[in-house]
Image (spheres, rainbow, N blue to C red):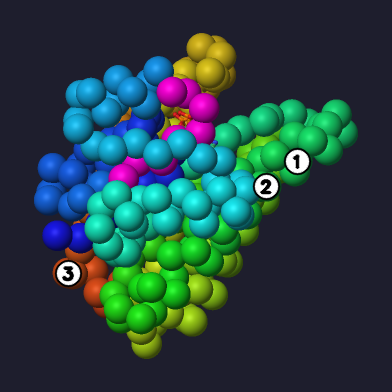
Amino acid sequence: MKIALVTGGTRGIGGGISRALSESGYFVAANYNKDIDTAKKFHEETGIPIFSWDVSDYDSCIKGVEEICNTLGGDVDVLVNNAGITKDGMLHKMDPIDWHRVIATNLTSVFNMCRVVIPAMREKRFGRIINLSSVNGLKGQVGQTNYSAAKAGILGFTKSLALESASKGITVNAIAPGYISTDMTDAIRDDIKEKIIDGIPVGRFGKVDEIANAVLYLSGEEASYVTGTTLSINGGQYL
Ligand code: NDP
């Protein structure tokens, strides 16, 4: 059985991805950061083991992956870099701390996690890496210079690592979701939400499972010829 590691994998989109992978027969390890109550509840409901560390910190990533490999008895076959945060604000008012925190959590984390798992994948000549970008990394968004920069950065990173890894049986792809109903989008004001929905051809926010199903496809053997690509799942928003 293959081992899958999902960062931010205990709630929201990551929670859905962890459940879908587990139901499809993967040994899943779900990482989270600080929300231990939600993580414990997720573990009780699903039986999926949970591991807490901050993915923006390289040394913590080394320790976290080591613990997972020891607990599950093997190396990571599928890495889903899903953990992410927003700290929105207009650039002319943005606190540099909010710039650095968003870049570290959303982009540097992807380097950290890939750097830690990829040597074993190269040795095994198999790996699947799926990075969560965003529609706002493709088109930009008011108040999200930090978030859009991180999510656009993920796309360049994905393409470059795909090129480096193609001959080793490792695929590296990105998913760029539109607006998906989770805690992250629950935080958007209702009047702004309505405006956003007006701009989505399908006429609603997406569902967590609609992202999780794409991860299942990209994780599988059948996607071995798909690498370096970005899959937009956004209800038809024109880019
Ligand atoms: P949520 O806010 O619902 O969940 C975020 C998850 O990331 C939580 O599990 C959280 O852990 C974890 N996390 C945050 N910071 C860290 C950290 N430093 N180390 C480890 N884990 C961390 O987010 P969503 O489910 O909405 O989003 C998931 C991904 O999809 C993100 O990358 C997001 O940018 C992207 N995305 C989301 C969209 C949406 O509409 N929801 C649209 C486009 C992209 P904890 O539970 O401990 O806080």
Q: Nearer the viewer, residue 123 or 142?
A: 123
Three-letter amino acid code at disc 1?
Trp
Q: Is the C-beta separation of discs 3 and 2 under 8 Å?
A: no
Q: Residue furthest right?
A: 92
On the rendered structure, is 6 left or right of 190? Answer: left
Quarter of the rendering containing residue 18 = top left
**Mark 2 C-beta closer than 8 Å to ligand 1:** no
Residue 157, given in percent of the width and then of the height, sits at: 56, 66
Name the residue tied to disc 1: 99
Reply above or below: 170 against 73.
below
As drawn, the label of residue 132 is none
Q: Can residue 104 be seen from the camera position used here?
A: yes
Q: How dense is the environment of label 1, judged by Cα within 10 Å: few (below 14), some, or many (20 and up)?
A: many
CA neighbours of label 3 inside 10 A, class few (<14), some (14 to 19), many (20+): few
Secondary element at image label 1: helix
Of residue 135 and residue 212, the one placed in the foreground of this image is 212
For the record, the magenta segment spans: 29-36
Residue that sits furthest to the front in the current view: 70
Q: Identify the element where label 2 is drawn.
A: helix
In this rendering, which labeled residue sits more in front, label 3 or label 2? 2
Asked if residue 226 lies left or right of residue 33, the reply is left
Name the residue: 54% across, 19% down.
188
Which residue in the structure is indicated by mark 3? 222
35 or 178, nearer to the observer: 35
Q: CB atoms at circles 2 and 1 under 8 Å apart? A: yes
Q: Position of residue 201 (x, y in %)?
A: 37, 36
Query: What amino acid is found at the position of numbered circle 3 in the picture?
Result: Glu
Rendered-image quadrant of the N terminus = bottom left
In the image, is residue 33 part of the stretch drawn in magenta?
Answer: yes
Q: Earlier in the sequence, mark 1 or mark 3?
A: 1
Residue carrying label 2? 103
Q: Amino acid at mark 2?
A: Ile
